[in-house]
């Protein structure tokens, strides 16, 4: 029988400090009404403190996950971290997380697929379990977006928050687990969503700092148009491919970038809003962390055998959908 990889545990970490729409009203020319009606966001959490990065949030999620699942750090064979806000250009944030969480018998690496990062990392990790190679793999989605947001630019500063989520993947004994995935990239999307400087093409300089080129640049409307069609299309495609009807789906877990994108995806899949995990109001767009954060918050309401569709769209462009049969 085919070995499946199943999510067997989940944990998350959200930093305690809040940034509300009301506070943003004092920082840029915006309003609580505009942010809420155009995005669905009320507040987001921000990681504060000197020298604290993505790995600090991720390590908390991983330590929580190990404790919850009664797993020793020594049992973990591989840890993959999806992030666009690595602690450093190198080494990989995954290595730093492993070190902070006491994981010593594993290898680890980062995946950069922006808001689709968790899906890309989950599908990758799945291969190591399905092949029979590994029995315990951790997948982390974590981003400290506040590190790359320009808080004088209303186009982007209202959108993002900081958080981390982590799942444990193990071989499944039954019919449950990661059932199928469709993932895509389109590099022509670069012009609409990117960070202009800091990489090898345009290394940091006084000029790039003055021009705020180390922050997220997004042409919101163009990204919106792609996101709304691609995320809805890929979610419908994975259902058709697997002969899943809307009544077969227990939950849609959409990336939390904009309430209007989430609504369009749910409509296209023919599922009602009470089957959609939504926490964008509390956390904003936490990039690679949105999907594990939803699963973490909803964990107690999930049942063995539930059909769950994970769906995301993000910078790259990257997008995709994963069908999961919940395993516990
Ligand atoms: N407050 C008040 N007004 C604002 C704000 C703000 N925070 N931001 C923009 N506006 C204004 C604009 O200046 C514009 O004014 P104008 O009409 O006078 O020119 C007006 O509001 C409309 O601006 P749009 O950009 O057209 O607003 P839109 O309805 O498209 O919403 C948003 C913007 C929320 C960014 C939306 O386009 C969106 O969600 N895009 C997709 C985001 C996404 O999915 N990203 C991918 C994941 S992110 C990642 O991968 C890292």
Image: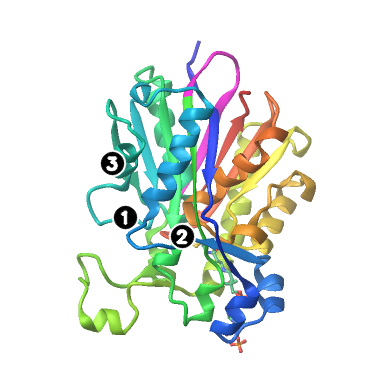
* Residue 249 seen: yes
* Residue at position x 34%, y 30% in the image: 78
Mark 2 or mark 3, earlier in chain:
2
Q: Is residue 229 left or right of residue 191?
A: right
Q: Under tag 2, what secondary structure?
A: loop
Label 1 Cα neighbours within 10 Å, binned few <14 / some 14-19 / many ≥20: many
- Residue position marked by numbered label 1 in the rendering: 87
> Up-down: is 265 above or below 63?
below
Label 3 Cα neighbours within 10 Å, binned few <14 / some 14-19 / many ≥20: many
Q: Are marks 2 and 3 in contact (CB under 8 Å)?
A: no
Q: Position of residue 38 (x, y in %)?
A: 67, 72
Label of residue 217 in the image: none
- Which stretch is magenta? 170-184
Q: What is the chief secondary structure element of the magenta stretch? A: strand
Q: Under tag 3, what secondary structure?
A: helix
- Residue position marked by numbered label 3 in the rendering: 95
Furthest residue to the bottom? 29
Q: How many marks?
A: 3
Q: Position of residue 306 (x, y in %)?
A: 69, 29
Furthest residue to the top? 1
Label 2 Cα neighbours within 10 Å, binned few <14 / some 14-19 / many ≥20: many
- Residue position marked by numbered label 2 in the rendering: 47
């Amino acid at each position: 029988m085919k070995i499946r990889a199943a999510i067997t545990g989940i944990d998350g970490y959200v930093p305690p400090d809040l940034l509300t729409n009301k506070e943003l009203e004092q920082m840029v020319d915006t309003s609580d009404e505009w942010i809420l009606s155009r995005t669905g966001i009320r507040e987001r959490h921000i990681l504060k403190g000197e020298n604290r990065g993505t790995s600090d949030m991720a390590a908390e999620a991983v330590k929580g996950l190990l404790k919850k699942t009664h797993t020793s750090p020594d049992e973990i064979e591989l840890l993959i971290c999806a992030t666009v806000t690595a602690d450093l250009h190198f080494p990989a944030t995954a290595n730093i997380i492993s070190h902070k969480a006491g994981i010593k018998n594993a290898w680890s690496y980062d995946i950069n697929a922006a808001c689709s990062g968790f899906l890309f990392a989950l599908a990758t990790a799945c291969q190591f379990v399905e092949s029979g190679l590994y029995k315990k793999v951790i997948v982390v989605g974590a981003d400290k977006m506040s590190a790359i947001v320009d808080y004088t630019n209303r186009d982007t500063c209202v959108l993002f928050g900081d958080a981390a989520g982590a799942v444990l993947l193990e071989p499944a004994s039954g019919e449950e687990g990661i059932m199928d995935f469709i993932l895509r990239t389109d590099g022509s999307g670069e012009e609409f969503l990117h960070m202009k400087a800091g990489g090898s093409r345009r290394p940091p300089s006084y000029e790039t700092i003055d021009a705020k080129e180390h922050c997220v640049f997004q042409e919101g409307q163009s990204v919106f148009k792609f996101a709304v069609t691609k995320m809805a299309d890929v979610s419908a495609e994975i259902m058709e491919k697997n002969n899943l009807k809307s009544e077969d789906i227990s939950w849609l877990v959409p990336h939390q970038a904009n309430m209007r994108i989430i609504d369009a995806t749910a409509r296209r899949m023919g599922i009602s809003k009470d089957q959609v995990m939504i926490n964008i109001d509390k956390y904003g767009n936490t990039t690679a962390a949105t999907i594990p954060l939803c699963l973490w918050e909803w964990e107690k309401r999930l049942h063995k055998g539930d059909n769950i569709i994970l769906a995301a769209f993000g910078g790259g462009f990257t997008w995709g959908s994963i069908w999961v049969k919940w395993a516990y």
